[in-house]
Image: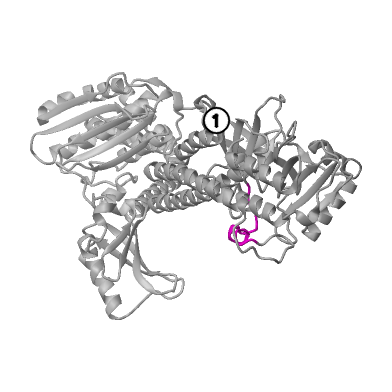
Amino acid sequence: MSRESRTRRLTRPAEQLARGRTPGNDVAATAAPPLISIVARTPSFPDLLPQLHHHALELTGGSCSLLFELNPRDGVLQATSGFGLDELRTDPWMPGEAEASLVSDAFRRTVPTLVTDATRQMPDLAGRLGTPGALLLPLGPAGERAGLLAIGFGSAPPEMSTIDAGEITHAFMTALELFRLRQNEELQRDLRELLNEFALALGATLNLSAGLEIICLGAKRLFGADRTSVWIHDRRARQLVLKASSDPEALTREVRVSADDPLTPAASSMRRNRSDILPAPDDGPTRTLAVPLRGTRRALGTIVFDGVRVEAGGELALLDRADELGRQLSSAIENMQLLEDVQRSRHELENTFDSIAHLVVVYDRRNRIVHANQAFASRLNLTREQLIDRPLAECVGPELIAWLGELDAADVRPTGDAALGREIFDPVLKAPFIVTLTDLLNQDRERVGSVIVARDMTPQSKLEAEREELRRRLTQSEKLAALGQFVAGIAHELNNPLQGVLGHLELLRATGAFPKHLRREVQTIYREADRAAKIVRNLLVFAGSRRLARRSVSLPGVLQKVLALRQTAWRALNIELVRNYGENLPRVQSDPLFLHQVFLNIILNAEQAISSTGRPGRIEVSAVAAAGRDRVVATVRDTGVGIAPDAMPRIFEPFFTTKEVGKGTGLGLAIAYGIVQEHGGHISAGNHPDGGAVFTVELPVAATIGR
């Protein structure tokens, strides 16, 4: 048998046995017994056991012997070696009530017990020894059980007074303890080598799975298993995950089992305190060894050895070795998991820190940066590593540094949960900010630095500007709506008498029923009345009294008709026309007559702005599709005098004009504004950086307009 199948942990110290004290005997040996000498000079445990059994038989006169060792897991005696036997039964010895009483009495009295009629009193033991009598020699300190040496006798019992039981028990217990220590040393050496490889793999990769693969391969050799696998407990999912295996094919896909599955060795053994040899499912020669991995507060997982060959009497040594591996590996895994938890928490905090859109910088009492988020580093076009230990004054503007210096000089610090704040334009960070200052405290609530949070006001300023623009548009729309209702009423009232005047004048002109010298005056009256009627019609258009006759229209086609009307006048005024139409422009859903009026009013304004300068000019007309192709954008730019700043807010108000009296009604752009709004579009005006005015009209394409 192998050495590991003969050894186990004993509680009695080897040095006490070497001094010659036997259980229940107060007489100290003055010289080393011969059996002890044999123990000392025999290095191999398999060679020693036969000699110990042989000398024990010589000292007692027995014919055979059987050594039982106590299994501390279940308190059962198990035969581990014998001498002079026809067969060594290694199954656990489960004595009956009478046998158990005799064994307990022997351990209680700690003296040899002679059973002369073992066939009747201890039939199971007599069957194992094959003799009618037996001598029971308890092994272990007083009150403790370590094992039992049973020596078989024939019909003639030995003379108890001639037997030195202490020499025999000393020798066996010393041998067991000595070789247990030797084996434990070898085990610790093997485990140290295996765990050192595991630690090197973790240190190089910080990958638990890579380290566990080394454990699987090394433990497979150490335990002589066919396959070794490590299962790690996923507490959130209540599952065991196969993390490593000596069989690479087992890791081709993720394998999970329920942590509550009693039929899975990994799950059934995870919550046990010690290793366990599980019965083979096919009653074969190999067994399954399950080793629970337990941390200080929780179950970590299980190591499962498949195909372990358990030698007769070697179960105790195998389980002890497995327990030692489980303890040391559990400690390493738990430390690695704690490290992973710390790293995960750190990464989460860093990700949270970097996800803050505001600029955050932490500096120490020396005014040097110790940490900054990604937003702050990006604003300076630097990496966070380049910012560490850099003076704060190099990274922010002088106004902020001066404010921080004033707070330090006045010893003004944030109180309670309140932070100090100030609005600052920082030239280094190139934006206006609302800056808040908070103390950085250590665990003793001592100030070790400060935290600056700078909130960029640029987006808020843009938002406020957009809100103001929307508010202005709303005000303009409300003003136009109210004015439209008022104008519509007046226009209808004026339209009827004007039509009557025009009709009668036309009748008078046709019949000639007035003196010739009044014809010119009548013509003037007719012309001015017709002009008043046109103004009334424009008022009705502005008020929205006419319904739009919408249809699919090509915007460049409308622009071409408008431009064709004014080209003769532009040649006289020396105005150049530049056109730029995008390809494959989508059509718009609109009333072409009203759209014609919109662009004609804008073109006339551009023409008059250029002519007022007295110089040649240029009108640029373009039409392109918006980025999403949901709108068509038309622009008309001139090189005239531009729009005065005080006139810009009122450019689309009705009856507002910058022209001389009699040259404009102030309704052209107001009518254009109303028509574009009626089409669901948007019109705006502004000045070009190179001079002149720019009018922009956005119209939705046909597909987005409701019928």
Residue 383 position (above or below residue 412): above
Q: How many marks?
A: 1
Residue 702 shows in the view: yes
Q: Residue at x 67, y 45 (%)?
A: 55
Q: Which region is colored magenta?
A: 8-20
* Relative image position of residue 70 (x, y in whole percent): 72, 48
* Relative image position of residue 49 (x, y in whole percent): 63, 42
Q: Is residue 172 magenta?
A: no
Pick the residue in front: 291 or 421: 291
SS category of the residue bearing label 1: loop
Q: Is residue 126 left or right of residue 170?
A: right
As drawn, the residue found furthest toward the bottom would be: 410
Determine which residue is flagged by label 1: 254
Pick the residue in front: 269 or 157: 157
Residue 291 shows in the view: no
Residue 220 position (above or below residue 22): above
Q: Is residue 17 magenta?
A: yes
Q: Is residue 630 left or right of residue 70?
A: left
